[in-house]
Amino acid sequence: MFTGIIETLGKVADLRTEGGNLHITVESSIANELKIDQSVAHNGVCLTVVALTDSTHTVTAIEETLNKTNLSHLKVGEPINLERCMQMNARLDGHIVQGHVDQTAVCTRYTELDGSWEYTFSYDPGVGNVTVEKGSICVNGISLTVVNSGPREFSVAIIPYTYEHTNLHNVREGSVVNLEFDIIGKYVARLMQR
């Protein structure tokens, strides 16, 4: 379980393919605090730490994960959002995030405003996911509030702190991002289908 509050930015240090799997090695300031078998969200994708050094950790994304997320688009040297799982005795500053990406979206509009940024993302509504204005959405693991909601797209407004401390500063028109829709909204949508 995560909150969508990014703990630190890591840097992709190595990518190695083995069969249908992708081994991702990330350099970060939290590597020396991690343990083997620990869950860490990478751009919102919950992955298990399988190897460690003093400054890096390695995780493995299987084919199913690569097909449903933007991890297959990673390049060495790129920043990646990292969040360790939440502690049960801590405040829930973002929203309830499982680390299970529902689908990807494409950035269709990026607007720099006077002191903030607005991003519009387009996604396939055929999967049954929905957004609501002022509701929660997780983009690349970042807990955000939906500003505008449409049947195929939504917008979010970004404050300077989030822009500077996450990999959103690299997202532009055409960038592919991971989406995890609000868990409560997903249950309500499923119940309404019945």
Image: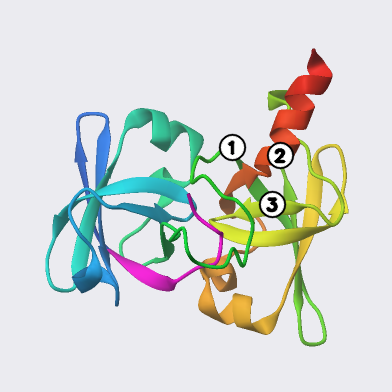
Q: Sequence-wise, which precedes: disc 1 or disc 2?
A: 1
Is residue 192 shown in magenta? Answer: no
Please name the amino acid that badge 1 sits on: Gln
Please name the amino acid that badge 3 sits on: Ile
Tally of numbered discs: 3
Q: Sequence-wise, which precedes: disc 3 or disc 1?
A: 1
Quarter of the C terminus within the rendering: top right
**Residue that sits furthest to the top in the current view:** 194
Question: Which callout, 3 or 1, points to the residue nearer the camera?
Answer: 3
**Residue that sits furthest to the front in the current view:** 89
Q: Which residues are magenta?
A: 1-12
Please name the amino acid that badge 2 sits on: Ile
Q: Is residue 85 above or below residue 93?
A: above
Relative horizontal placement of residue 30, taking residue 163 as reference (left or right): left
Q: Residue at x 77, y 21 (%)?
A: 191
Which residue is denoted by mark 1 in the rendering? 103
Q: CA distance from mark 1 to mark 2?
A: 17 Å
Which residue is denoted by mark 2 in the rendering? 184
Which x, y percent locates residue 130? 78, 37
Q: Does residue 165 appear anywhere in the picture?
A: yes
Q: Sequence-wise, which precedes: disc 3 or disc 2?
A: 3
- Secondary structure, mark 3, is strand
Q: CA distance from mark 3 to mark 1?
A: 12 Å
Relative horizontal placement of residue 133, taking residue 45 as reference (left or right): right
Which residue is denoted by mark 3 in the rendering? 137
Q: Nearer the viewer, residue 75 or 194?
A: 194
CB-based contact (under 8 Å), mark 3 and mark 1: no
Q: CA distance from mark 3 to mark 2?
A: 11 Å
The circle on residue 46 is none
- Label 3 Cα crowd, 10 Å radius (few <14 / some 14-19 / many 20+): many
Q: Residue at x 84, y 57 (%)?
A: 134
Question: Which callout, 3 or 2, points to the residue nearer the camera?
Answer: 2
